[in-house]
Amino acid sequence: MKKTKAKSRSFNKLSSQGKPFTRKIKKPGRTDANKSSRKVSNKVAKKLKTLRPPELKRMILRPFLEDKPGRSFLQIVRKAPERPDIFNSADVSVLRYTGDRIKLGEGSSATYHKAIATKTVTRKDRGPDTTYKQIIFARDPTYKGALIDCPQIILHCQCARHQFMWEYALWEVGAANIITSNGNKPVETNPRMRAGCCKHAVMSYLKLKERKI
Ligand SMILES: [Zn+2]
């Protein structure tokens, strides 16, 4: 019990209250073909456990816009460009996900939203693997269903692509908080303000869909 609590706290500092639940991703079946790759992934997972996970920045520069229509996770993933995001999502795997509620605001104005935090790793041919965390939560605090069916979600990823391309564009449609970017329009990286997402979010979406979370 203690272990689960500690894990959840370090994994998602934004969350509080409610009983956290952690589920491990089911390992693939034992076939000769994936035996070696499983060994590698176990090694990576072990290594990651010893490393301190990067902290999510808690400071929200600008909160999501409630008067905007918002987006479902599927709508956002559909806007992700085929290259590089959809294509490169094949290199990403979800290490684990934690379900919890996220607390927004303070005092009597605090709201608790259904949330999922995922941790993904990208294995590279060259250079070290990279891990990032994503947070997906329902915009409506009263929403109780699966996040995959939620009509309005708020998405965050720690990666640079989210920061420089997607965060502002998602914020503009009411599907993100401004957290890691400086809050300026991405005039060079995303001039059309396409409300898409990074490869990590694409893989998280596929995992959540598979699990019907
Ligand atoms: Zn990302």
Image (spheres, grey):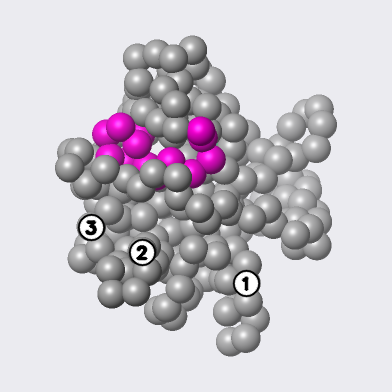
Image side of residue 6 versus residue 66, left or right:
right
Where 4 falls versus 102 (above or below)? below
Image side of residue 136 versus residue 198, left or right:
left
Tag 1: residue type?
Answer: Lys
Can residue 171 be spotted in the picture?
Answer: yes
> Picture coordinates of residue 155 (x, y %)?
40, 45
Dot 1, how many residues are within 10 Å of its Cα: few (below 14), some (14-19), or many (20+)? few
Q: Earlier in the sequence, mark 3 or mark 2?
A: 2
Q: Is residue 87 magenta?
A: no
> How many angstroms separate mark 3 from mark 2 (CA)?
14 Å
Q: Which residue is mark 2?
A: 105
- Please tell me whether mark 2 sits on a helix, a strand or a loop: loop
> Picture coordinates of residue 163 (x, y %)?
52, 33
- Please tell me whether mark 3 sits on a helix, a strand or a loop: loop
Q: Which residue is mark 1?
A: 7
Q: Which mark is residue 140?
A: 3
Q: Quadrant of residue 10?
A: bottom right
Q: Badges 1 and 2: C-beta atoms under 8 Å apart?
A: no
Q: Is residue 177 magenta?
A: yes
The boundaries of the magenta stretch are 170-182
